[in-house]
Amino acid sequence: MKRGTASVTAEICRKFGNDRSRLMDIAIAVQERFGCVSHEAMEEIARAVGSHRVEVESLVSFYSFLSVKPQGKVVIRLCRDIVDWMKGYEAVAEAMSRELGVTMGETTPDGAITLTHTPCIGMSDQAPAALINGVVVTHLTPERGRQLIRDLRKHLDPQQLVTMVGDGNNEHPLVRSMVRNNIRMRGPVHFAPFDPGSGLRKALALAPAEVIRAIKDSRLRGRGGAGFPAGLKWEMAAGSPGERRYVLCNADEGEPGTFKDRVLLTECADQLLEGMAIAGYAVGSDTGIVYLRGEYRYLLAFLESRIEERRRKGLLGRDILGRKGFHFDIRVQLGAGAYICGEETALISSCEGFRGDPKNRPPFPPQQGYLGSPTIVNNVETLCCVSRILVEGSDWFASMGSSRTTGTKVLSISGDCRKPGVYEVPFGITPAELLEMSEAENTGTLLIGGPCRQMIGPDRLEGRICYDDLATGGAIVVFNRARNRLEIAEHYLDFFIEESCGHCTPCRVGLILLKDLVHKVIEGAGAPADLAEMRSLSNFIIRTSRCGLGQAAPNPVLGALEIFGDLSAGFVAERRPGLLPEFDLSKAVIDAELRVGRQSKYV
């Protein structure tokens, strides 16, 4: 390593206090400075933080935004989510690839531009989209893709691609993004005017236990998808032994088709930060961390400015609002592209400077979480609800929604509809009503809660969106009747295979075997026994995988089989004993035909 490079790496480590637990920040900073985290840089980092090079390499190799090998000065990450695919991903990818003269995953010979693909970047309402060195580019077409490449070749400055900014705080000088909020329906919890400090003052008028009681009385359930009662989680954290406690905000909405937290972070940042401070007061914590997914890095400077502004107003820091002894501050931890970090224990691992590996439970995070201390992990929407509950009261909040799921839900709707975007609606609303709002027609399938949840057909459109019927963390993806359900399932299997950490065999191997079966049926080579094998293998993966990723990954396949069993049966047929339907006789004799110079008349 050149001496200058070594000194820069050491300087980056010092900036983060040579703190082993800040390894994520260090690796990201080195990646941005040098375009990679080389083996030499890893040695320097390990020496500075008192770790081992293999630990640094373990982290670098885990996150898709980090790389051991040098990347181009500009890295184009074209989103390959299913909605982007429906809206023309393949044509855009081909146009950009031809213009650059490289295939996907390669860098131009001059080392200027790398073209690669990435899973959902939270822009399904404005797909196809791409991240270019963190700058979001939306509504791509083949022609726009080609022009984008030509412009980049001139200046290599992705920021110059932003010629028009989006609405709301997307216009803020620290954001200046072409992203649009697409808020189609504003509800009373999240999108009503909010006075910073109003919820916190109400909280400080109560004892910490009374704040927890208010959250329990509101019957607020975590908005991440599992629906665990927020007040109960806080009570567990407050009552668990530990010298310190932590409040973590899960802003890693990596579930394909989900983008509502992106809008809440953009438009409701104060409400979120205030919810964290209220949680800190309730459980006795002095430290909060917002885990911001790497795909939303364009919001980082804006969020940090809001945190600093709240410090100036006495809403964060020491002796908040004059309350002696109540200290609470927040930092932002940036992620680096790993779907599994949306799982709370994996998120904690990442905040601690490790690979985003899920942890075994028990103990649960409220008992032993971040750095072994009692920790609350709530998502963006949940913490925004907290602020409003303290302002408006538990009864007001509990008066909305369904009998067992109170309040409102912010949904991200995308796919085959005319009005994709964000809708704040009361819990209990039906899928049929959502389809009417979003102007979807001829709907054949709905994905409720993303691929890790459930796929429903027209027979469930009168169900209820709530944790006791159709639970969702926020994603609603609409597919019309022309879409092949098994192709949808296969697409999501590709996603889960790419995102699997590979720790356990059922997930690492089972998903590939399952994909092979699905593909075989789609290609028309399947037998009825393959459908039974799909079900059996799916259930085996669900039962035996170590974490939520493997336990959820087969759901799209099971959904397609359960709802559209008759249609799937049309893809398969009984085969004569001893014949392999996937064996292509024509391909098998090509070499022989070429050798003898004539075509077989028996094939």
Image (cartoon, rainbow, N blue to C red):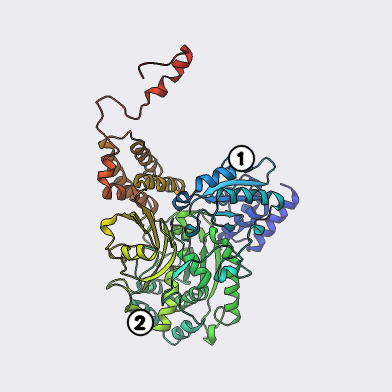
Residue at x 58% of width, y 82% of height: 313
Dot 1 crowding, Cα within 10 Å, few <14, some 14–19, many 20+: some
Q: Is residue 226 visible?
A: no
Q: Tag on residue 247?
A: none
- The residue under label 2 is 396
Q: Residues within 10 Å of mark 2 (few under 14, many from 20)?
A: some
Q: Which callout, 2 or 1, points at the residue further toward the start of the chain?
A: 1
Q: Secondary structure at mark 1?
A: loop
Left or right position of 489 against 57: left
Relative image position of residue 365 (x, y in whole percent): 41, 64
Which residue is under mark 1?
A: 102
- In the rendered image, residue 118, in percent from the top left (x then y), is placed at 52, 50
- Give x and y (percent) for residue 269: 52, 72
Rendered-image quadrant of the C terminus: top left
Q: Indicate the position of residue 34 as horizontal and vertical percent values.
A: 67, 51
Instruction: Name which residue type carries label 1.
Output: Val
Q: Taking 600 as reference, is 245 above or below it?
A: below
| Residue closest to the far top | 596
Q: Residue 294: which quarter of the image? A: bottom right
User: How many discs mark residues in the rendered view?
Assistant: 2
Residue placed most toward the observer, 564 or 245? 564
Q: Which residue occupies the foreground of this view, 482 or 415?
A: 482
Marks 2 and 1 sit apart, C-alpha to C-alpha, by: 57 Å
The residue at the far right in this view is 3
Instruction: Look at the image and tell me whether residue 231 can be seen.
Output: yes
